[in-house]
Image: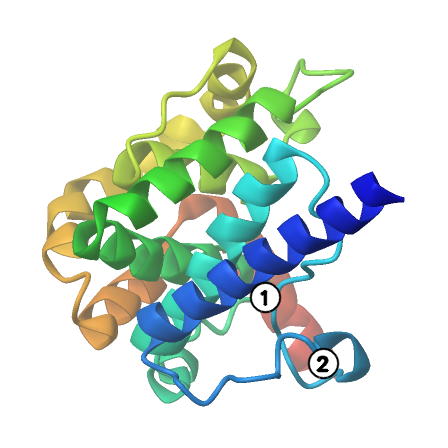
């Protein structure tokens, strides 16, 4: 009984610490009880904090809370939607690129935030499993693109498995994105320049040309 009470108190302190950090990073000091009531509201997009049972759980919660706060602080929804690619497959990669942008800004802002993301992404890299890994079809483009962005913007060191996962798609990304990397890094603070450039890059990726042609044919037929 004593241990359960002690665990509950520790969890409560951790939640309070994460909540305070969210408010400071996001500049939102009106959050108050929203996080505690998040389970009862479908409209709130806060991190689930009930299952903080291991070190890995806390690392994940801390990084996700930082990411959520940075999105609130640095990501403008109108600009995001204005530059959103028309191609459906590009949209998911565009979302990953925007997440990497505001997380990178947070890492520049505070070393502690950068460490939180590095620790969490390293855990994610270590936990990846693949039963079959022989061709490009065995790795989704979203998964490969996130690894590419983590490597380029967060300087995350990939392990043997994730390097192989990325290898199936890396040439495609390098040909289209690598020449623009410096421009993107120089414009992390300018969401419009960054997102419009990424939208342009993604829509010009050769791997999406076939899909765009098929979508156009379907629309013409309709």
Foreground residue among 116 and 167: 116
* Vertical position of residue 185 compared to residue 57: above or below: below
Residue pushed farthest front?
A: 2
Residue at x 33% of width, y 68% of height: 25
User: How is this picture coloured?
Assistant: rainbow
| Location of residue 20 in the rendering, given as x and y in whole percent from the top left corner | 43, 69
For the residues labelled 2 and 1, say whether their Cβ atoms are less than 8 Å apart. no
Q: Which residue occupies 19% across, 45% down?
A: 181
Q: Earlier in the sequence, mark 2 or mark 1?
A: 2
Q: How many numbered discs sit on the rendered protein?
A: 2
Q: Is residue 206 above or below residue 12?
A: above
Residue shown at 17% from the left, 48% from the top: 180
Residue located beneath label 2 in the image: 37
Q: What residue is pinned by disc 1?
A: 88
**Does any portion of residue 129 appear in the rendered image?**
yes
Question: In x, y percent, where is residue 40?
Answer: 80, 82
Vertical relation: 70 (above or below) 42: above
83 horizontally vs 208: left or right: left
Picture quadrant where residue 12 is located: bottom right
Check the image and name the residue furthest to the right.
1
Q: Is residue 176 visible?
A: no
């Amino acid at each position: 009984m004593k241990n359960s009470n002690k665990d509950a108190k520790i969890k409560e302190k951790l939640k309070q610490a994460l909540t305070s950090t969210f408010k400071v990073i996001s500049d939102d000091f009106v959050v108050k009880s929203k996080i505690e009531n998040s389970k009862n509201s479908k409209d709130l997009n806060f991190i689930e904090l009930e299952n903080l049972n291991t070190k890995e759980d806390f690392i994940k919660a801390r990084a996700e809370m930082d990411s959520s706060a940075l999105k609130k602080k640095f990501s403008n929804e109108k600009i995001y939607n204005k530059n959103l690619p028309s191609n459906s497959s590009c949209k998911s990669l565009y979302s990953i690129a925007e997440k990497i942008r505001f997380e990178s800004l947070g890492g520049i802002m505070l070393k502690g935030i950068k460490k939180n993301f590095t620790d969490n992404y390293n855990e994610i890299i270590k936990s990846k499993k693949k039963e079959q890994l022989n061709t490009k079809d065995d790795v989704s483009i979203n998964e490969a693109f996130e690894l590419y962005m983590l490597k380029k913007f967060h300087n995350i060191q990939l392990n043997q498995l994730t390097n192989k996962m990325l290898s199936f798609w890396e040439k495609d990304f390098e040909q289209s994105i690598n020449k623009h990397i410096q421009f993107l890094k120089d414009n992390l603070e300018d969401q419009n320049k960054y997102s419009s450039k990424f939208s342009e890059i993604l829509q010009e990726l050769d791997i999406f040309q076939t899909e765009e042609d098929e979508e156009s044919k379907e629309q013409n037929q309709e």
